[in-house]
Image (cartoon, grey):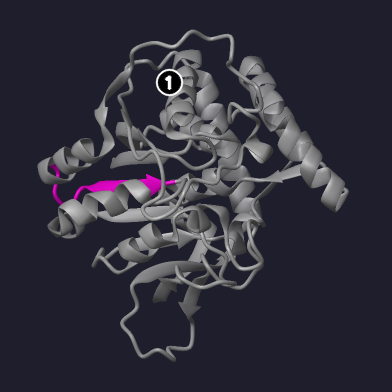
Amino acid sequence: MHKVILDVDTGIDDAIALIIALGAGEIELLGITTVSGNVHVEQSTRNTLRLLKFLGREEVKVYKGSSGPLDRPLVDASQIHGSNGLNGQLEDLEDYPGVQGDAIDFYKESFNRYPGEVTLVMTGPQTNLARLLREAPETASRIKAVIAMGGALRVPGNHTPLGEFNIMTDPMAAYENLHAGIENFTLISLDVTLKALIVEEDFDQIRNPALKEFLLRLLDRYMDRYETKNQVRAVPMHDPLTLLYLLNPGILKVEKHYLTVEFQSLFSDGHTICDYLGQYQRRPNAYVPVAIDRDAFKREFIKRLNQSGDVL
């Protein structure tokens, strides 16, 4: 069993990662924390609660986190995820009073109660973790592992020429977290998430008709954009791959290197720098992906969605 906290800025692919997590028998989901990123934290929290209601999992605890990055205004991705972050889905569901409290307080309580046992999976900007470590830096040694979606190492960014969206949204947070002394830190970068492609026909393998319909509606705008650019109706599953790596590490080949983030440059702000050759002569601080088994990813993706669909 993996004790897990899932930290999300619930947009389209965060929602799919959450669906997978809820169906995974190996995951004890302690709670979900929200953050501003794809949409403002108020909306990401609302999306998380509505998704849990849609899935019949209102018992899962949700904690609201940071409203903006550490040192800059929020620039969201509503142009990609739609104004509500879920391509207009679940707007007909009423809100329910499901927020349990503050994300940072929940972090402190969880890492202190279960030292060395809790894995933090982050699919949005890393602001919440950075705020925790500013308040309680000793907590870094109590975290079992961090798995975060973010960065563009040997590929172009998706927000600027060098910057991936999650890192670019709050590069200071990512920089501080990487240098906080967390022993087991893995960054799942665009280098592999862009290869974690699911084509529209793959959803024919989803057994639950309601789940299949929801996923296709959720992803419709994503696939439109990808098809316009690449002439294939497909979508890269950034956040689901991040969660699936926890469940099946064999999907990715990773190496440990020195990793840092630029946060004060005019042109390379948000650039995630990996010292593959050891030229900085600094101690490796993070695991980074160097290859993906695409077939294994796709099999795991379909398998896990079907597991979730079976319990809906």
Q: Which residue is mark 1?
A: 49
Q: Residue at x 63, y 63 (%)?
A: 157
| Relative to 219, residue 177 above or below | below
User: In the image shown, does 245 or 100 lie closer to the viewer?
Assistant: 100
Q: From which residue to which does the magenta span run?
A: 114-122
Mark 1 Cα-neighbour bin, 10 Å: few <14, some 14–19, many ≥20: many
Q: Amino acid at mark 1?
A: Leu
* Residue 249: in magenta span: no
Residue 76 appears left or right of 257: right
Q: Is residue 256 visible?
A: no
| Relative to 264, residue 140 above or below | above
| Relative to 104, residue 140 above or below | below
Residue 237: give x, y in percent of width and height. Answer: 61, 45
Quarter of the rendering containing residue 4: top left
Q: Is residue 273 visible?
A: yes
Residue 121: give x, y in percent of width and height. Answer: 38, 47
* Residue 119: in magenta span: yes
Residue 20 appears left or right of 219: left
Quarter of the rendering containing residue 27: top left
Q: Secondary structure at mark 1?
A: helix
Q: Residue at x 30, y 54 (%)?
A: 130
Q: Residue at x 20, y 48 (%)?
A: 117
User: In the image shown, does 259 or 114 lie closer to the viewer?
Assistant: 259
Residue 104: give x, y in percent of width and height. Answer: 24, 40
Residue 299 appears left or right of 28: right
Count the numbered circles shown.
1
User: In the image shown, does 252 or 138 lie closer to the viewer?
Assistant: 138
